[in-house]
Image (cartoon, grey):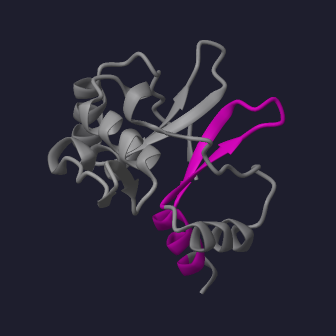
Amino acid sequence: MTRDPILARPEMPLNEAIKILADRRISGLPVVDENNNLVGVISETDLMWQETGVTPPAYIMLLDSVIYLENPSRYERDLHKALGQTVGEVMSGEPVTIAPDKPVREAAQLMHERSIHRLPVLDTSGKVIGILTRGDIIRAMAAEA
């Protein structure tokens, strides 16, 4: 794991977070509130909406009524991400986390099952003390071989 990772705040301008990701060659940042409690993660995936935009959900008209074929709230969330100007507007909330005493195998399984690329590591008080990436897991596997 990478100890003491760079942290973002929800009010951080998006272009500042993008610059950090590009300059440091990293793919995501934990986002913490004013009490340093984890509130989300901003990643390359979240930022893709800025470039790709969103497609309105498919719908049909029936007797002057609109019937959406997809959940319209998903479109609203995606649109918000595409138009966001701060980290808080674009980040993914409710991040998956792990404790520092958990085995690498458990972290790998969690990352695989949830299709995530990074796991913030939280201490017992809920503060971010590190971040575990897929690359960290591969390096741990190589060290054991």
Q: Position of residue 100 (x, y in %)?
A: 75, 50
Identify the residue at horizontal 41%, vertical 60% (top origin): 70
Circle count? 0
Q: Position of residue 41 (x, y in %)?
A: 49, 40
Q: Quadrant of residue 13?
A: top left
Identify the residue at horizontal 67%, vertical 49% (top origin): 97
Is 143 colored magenta in this rendering? no
Asked if residue 135 is positioned above or below residue 92 in the image, the reply reads below
Is 120 colored magenta in this rendering? yes
In the displayed image of the protein, which residue is found farthest to the left? 51
Identify the residue at horizontal 84%, vertical 36% (top origin): 124
Observer-nearest residue: 106 or 78? 78
Observer-nearest residue: 93 or 135? 93
Q: Give, as a single range, the part of the protein colored magenta.
A: 117-142
In the displayed image of the protein, which residue is found farthest to the bottom? 145
Q: Position of residue 24 (x, y in %)?
A: 29, 41
Q: Position of residue 58 (x, y in %)?
A: 30, 61
Q: Is residue 2 toward the left or the right of residue 70 in the image?
A: right
Q: Is residue 54 toward the left or the right of residue 8 in the image?
A: left
Identify the residue at horizontal 30%, vertical 39% (top origin): 79
Q: Quadrant of residue 108?
A: bottom right
Q: Quadrant of the C terminus?
A: bottom right
In the displayed image of the protein, which residue is found farthest to the front? 63
